[in-house]
Image: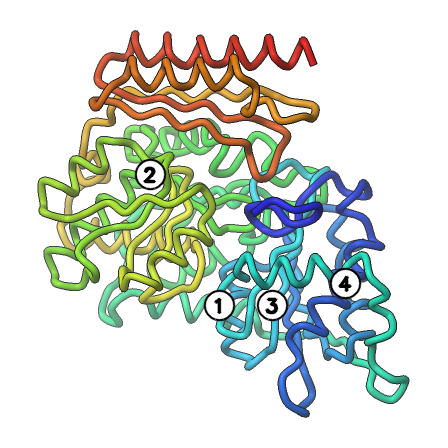
Amino acid sequence: MAGQYFGTDGIRGRANKFPMTAEVAMRVGMAAGLSFQRGNHRHRVVLGKDTRLSGYMIENAMVAGLCAAGMDVFLLGPIPTPAVAMLVRSLRADIGVMISASHNPYYDNGIKLFGPDGYKLSDEIEERIEGMLDKDIELALADSDGLGRAKRVDGVHDRYIEFAKRTLPRSMSLSGLRIVVDCANGASYKVAPEALWELGAEVVAINVEPNGFNINKECGSTHPAGLQKKVHEVRADIGIALDGDADRVVIVDENGAIVDGDQIMALIAESWHQSGRLAGGGVVSTVMSNLGLERFLGDMKLQLHRTKVGDRYVVEHMRAHGLNVGGEQSGHIVLSDFSTTGDGLVSALQVLACIKRQNRPVSELSKKFEPVPQLLKNVRISGGKPLEEAPVKAAIEEGRNRLGKSGRLVIRPSGTEPLIRVMAEGDDPQLVEAVVNDIVGILQETRSAA
């Protein structure tokens, strides 16, 4: 679903521009607050944010809207998205709110909503909330004596750190491991280094000095070059790169090579399968995951279930079919035995557990399959529906025919940016490149002619 407000991961946009304005944020708070009132108890919301400057504006606007709807707001401050999902359940809240644009630059922001079960909202609930935003919502708000209160909550970092630590066996220590963790100057800048240190590791923390502008700036999971350099510099055993709200992770091995989400899922799935923990006979990922992952799982008689892009669609499929490992190539890893959403720190801890159990370096453990040549290119658009144009449709059909059964072609609009993403993969890298370039060329021509 992609409506006027909600995209593939909540509401997102340029801060102080529609739809990411204080007015919209306040109305989202009103609508969400009204949508999740159950019974006659004091209703409560947990509200977290990452470290970008506009978080102050959006936070205060949402507090106003939520209080107007009669909700008490527990302000968590800067904290990872998965911590908000966990605290919704831990504090018996009616709704959870995370103010973050995830891996985007500081000038963007977003609103992610969680239900009382800690899961992201379904399309249907988002549609209901969106339908309320442009109506006279004020008529349904609380009376003067039913307004909510807002207060800062202490100790939430400690709660999340303990939660993350408990995902490992009680007897397991990370002693002897030197770990570099890149917190992207984002929401995990306190909790991730502390959790790793308490588990016994020697921790080198980088990008842990947020200033409102430097979140994700040439750091974190989308820019791991600095982490790779630091791993070499301090001769670390592993590097962990989180994104701005810490719901995704990228690993760097001891040689500085990047381990993406597909390889992380393969490693965890194999480990859990061997120990009898893997549920549902497979893994859930999106259409963007590499064909090599599908083949690797197939060799173990496991199935790769594919969904459309967006970690909440992965989670929905996991819940519907009883699987407990899923995620995205980008590093959103969902381990439903522990979390209701992607959790970069918890996923990294599972990788570290494999290292400790097998006493082997990351470079040996993490190369589970040889990726099939894959190429992704983005075409920026300024409006219209280029994928519905006849020349574009013809180019896509021709590309699929050229790749045949030994390859895949995925064309989709981004849910978070004004882009068309063109991805192809197959055993012949030259053919893959030619197919992608041809489709990109047609899209660019269509854009120019519009």
Instruction: Give the structural element (helix, strand or loop) at label 4.
Output: helix
Q: Nearer the viewer, mark 1 or mark 3?
A: 3
Mark identifier at residue 160: 1
In front of the other: 250 or 191? 250
Tag 1: amino acid = Tyr
**Taking 364 as reference, is 443 above or below it?**
above
Q: Work out whether 67 lies above or below 434.
A: below
In terms of image quadrants, where is residue 45? bottom right
Select label 4 or label 1 by which is in front: 4
The numbered mark at residue 236 is 2
Task: Give the Cα separation between the discs numbered 2 and 3.
Answer: 37 Å
Q: Residue 254 carries which label?
A: none
Name the N-terminal-most of marks 2 and 4.
4
Classify mark 2: helix, strand or loop.
loop
Mark 4: few/some/many CA within 10 Å (<14, 14-19, 20+): many
Amino acid of disc 4:
Met
**Residue at the spot 71% in from the left edge and 59% down from the top edge:** 131
Per the model, the C-alpha gap separating discs 4 and 1 is 23 Å
Q: Determine whether, in the image, residue 378 is placed left or right of residue 111.
A: left
Dot placed on the residue nearer the N-terminal end, 2 or 3: 3
Query: Which mark is drawn over residue 96?
Result: 3
Residue 305 x/y as whole percent? 28, 47
Q: Do the residues labelled 4 and 1 touch (CB within 8 Å)?
A: no
What distance separates the C-alpha of mark 1 from that of mark 3?
Answer: 15 Å
**Which amino acid, mark 2?**
Ala
Using the image as rendered, state which of residue 15 and residue 207 is in the foreground.
15
Q: Quadrant of the C terminus?
A: top right
The residue at which mark 4 appears reads as 62
Q: How far apart are marks 2 and 1 (CA)?
A: 25 Å
Sequence-wise, the earlier of marks 1 and 3 is 3
Q: Quadrant of residue 111?
A: bottom right
